Image (cartoon, grey):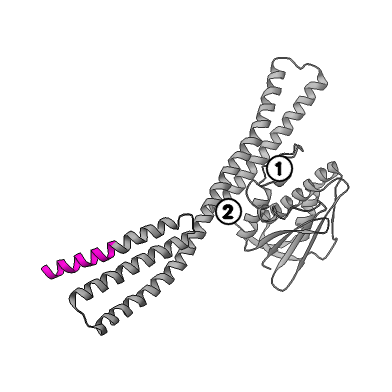
Amino acid sequence: MRSLLLIGLFSLAAGGVVGLAGAGVLRLLRGRSITVHVVALLAVTIVAVVAGVVAVARAMFLSTHDLQVVLVTVNASAVISLAVGVVFGRRLARAATWAAQAEAGRRELVAWVSHDLRTPLAGLRAMAEALEDGVVSDPQAVADYHRRIRVESDRMSALVDDLFELSRITSGALRLTPAAVPLGDLVSDAIATTAPLADSRGVRVVAAESGWPVVTASEPELARVIANLLVNSVRYTPERGTVRIDAGRDRDHVWLAVSDSCGGIPESDLPRVFDVAFRGSKARTPDGLPGGGLGLAIVRGLVEAQGGRVSAGNVGSGCRFEVRLPP
């Protein structure tokens, strides 16, 4: 019993010295990645075990051969532990990064939505009070107030619809019904829906008359993708500009591309164009268009839910959004 107690004390002493040194090392590593911290923590643990084994071996007068056998065994376990630590440390780092980005996106979304709701709500309240108090009585002014109330109501309705769609995507409540979908029909419907907006902004939307492939996808969600891409391109294309829609099929994918003449997206913004509530440098331009910067985030969510991917890049005097889906 006494010998076991001595072994425990030797192990604790050796491990304690290493632990104190390891705490100092971890303190110096503040601000480094999670992977570095995990590997350092495992290394400290392994060194503490080795120190304890060596201290006990010296106290017990183990032969050099026996000590080498023990150390080889410990070192083999150390290699495995460090390898596992690197793998899972990287996973933890990616998960932490994703969580931080998600939290930042949530805060940004709340800020954008608060801004986009506060302004129209204040306007609606002011116009409603003016009509109720009889401040505005001229028929033409009353009609204008009614029109503006409808416009702001449409803006908020569109924002709520976008939030609902995004919540379906992020919560896993999205239910897809894949079927053979002719892209030409969806593009034709999207162009017709977007025509009033394009006409009001003096933007021309063009598409090929034939040659549209058929893709296996969920039709309502794919229609939403095309409509969102079209609205986004029309919104940022200057007057007398052109938005073009193309599609095709290669060996592995059916692709659809929407190109515009918006002047291009800053390179620093390209990695973020599909982030929630990101609307670039024109984010707060009062152009009278509904939306909370969620359209492209919804596009990415709906495309990825169907096993595809979406990308954005600058081409010529504008930018190009390309959707690739399994055939």
What amino acid is labelled 1 in the image?
Answer: Ala
Q: Identify the disc placed on residue 299.
A: none
Q: Is residue 12 left or right of residue 145?
A: left
- Is 4 in the magenta? yes
Question: Looking at this view, is 175 or 49 the one in front?
Answer: 49
CA separation in Å, label 1 and label 2: 28 Å
Residue annotated with mark 1: 283
Few, some or many residues within 10 Å of mark 1 (<14, 14–19, 20+): few
What amino acid is labelled 2 in the image?
Answer: Leu
Q: Position of residue 133 (x, y in %)?
A: 70, 15
Q: Secondary structure at mark 1?
A: loop
- Highlighted magenta segment, given as a residue range: 1-16
- In the rendered view, would you say 16 is above or below 75? above
Q: Secondary structure at mark 2?
A: loop
- In the rendered view, would you say 264 is above or below 161? below
In the picture, which quadrant includes the C terminus?
Answer: bottom right
- Is 327 in the magenta? no
The image quadrant that residue 196 belongs to is top right
Magenta region, main secondary structure: helix
Residue annotated with mark 2: 174
Question: Residue at position x 48%, y 54% from top?
Answer: 31
